Image (cartoon, rainbow, N blue to C red):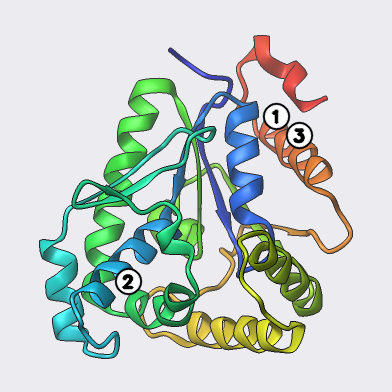
Amino acid sequence: MAGALRGVVALDGPSGTGKTTVARKLADRLSAGYLDTGAMYRVVTLAVLRAGVDPADSVRVAAVAADMEFTIGTRPDRPSVTLAGEDVTAAIRGRDINQDVSAVSAVPAVRELLVTRQRKVIDELLAEIGGIVVEGRDIGTVVAPDAPLKIYLTASPEIRAARRRAQDSAAGRDTTHADVLASVDRRDRLDSSRVTSPLRPAEDAVHVDTSELNIDQVIVALAELASQRGMLNDHTAEVTR
């Protein structure tokens, strides 16, 4: 069944900008598919750690990624991740994953493998329902460079750290603002400086600063941008209001 959205919305940005929440809510509002590419790198990181492999050992990390079996759900209202049949949706958000995912995602062989899979998912969802919201750090530049709407979410480091700490608290993890801010800064440096597919906005991306916006305001703004690009079915134009 076709949804409201036609085509790909590429949503990029650093950690703590609200990408995941925004992408899921926007996809749900537009009856579109949803793909969290970051979850793919996280599940590979989990597999690497469970295998006892050093995340800095690119050869062994690539081998784990090539042999593992995992699934990623594409329903915005029911995100799910499995590893070898086990539901690891919560496990991939742990502190150990946060610390090592940048190293794993910097391995070129891992990125090549996952980008191929991400493009396959995008093509399947476009054929099935017509539209998809894809979030990550290289969607507009690498995964879907032809996406008709590319968004780069930003927010100040202080705001992003506060949001991440709130997420940690909700999950029962005890962290300090200073520790989380340091973690955010470290992740930014690693993601922006990696050789393969570094974090950066696409040249034609629309920058949206979420520092002073709530989620609903961001969703309305992005839905309006999709409407302006002619990406919404005529009978669903009301979703932007």
Where is residue 153 drawn, in percent x and y? 68, 60
**Towards the viewer: 205 or 127:** 127
**Towards the viewer: 121 or 28:** 28
Could you give the CA–CA distance between mark 3 and mark 2, rounded to whole angstroms? 36 Å
Q: Are marks 3 and 2 in contact (CB under 8 Å)?
A: no
Residue type pointed to by label 3: Glu
Q: Residue furthest right?
A: 212
Picture quarter containing residue 159? Answer: bottom right
Q: Is residue 92 above or below residue 81?
A: below
Residue type pointed to by label 1: Ser
Residue at 50% in and 65% down: 137
Picture quarter containing residue 238? Answer: top right
SS at badge 1:
helix
Where is residue 18 drawn, in percent x and y? 68, 57
Q: Is residue 199 above or below residue 151?
A: below
Circle number at residue 224: 3
Residue at 73% in and 71% down: 160
Q: Are marks 1 and 3 in contact (CB under 8 Å)?
A: yes
User: Closer to us: mark 3 or mark 2?
Assistant: 2
Characterize the local packing of mark 3: few (<14), some (14-19) or many (20 or more) Cα atoms within 10 angstroms.
some
Where is residue 197 drawn, in percent x and y? 40, 73
Position of the C terminus, as image quadrant, is top right
**N-term-proximal mark, 1 vs 2:** 2
SS at badge 3:
helix
Position of the N terminus, as image quadrant, is top left
Characterize the local packing of mark 1: few (<14), some (14-19) or many (20 or more) Cα atoms within 10 angstroms.
some
Circle number at residue 45: 2
User: Closer to us: mark 1 or mark 2?
Assistant: 2
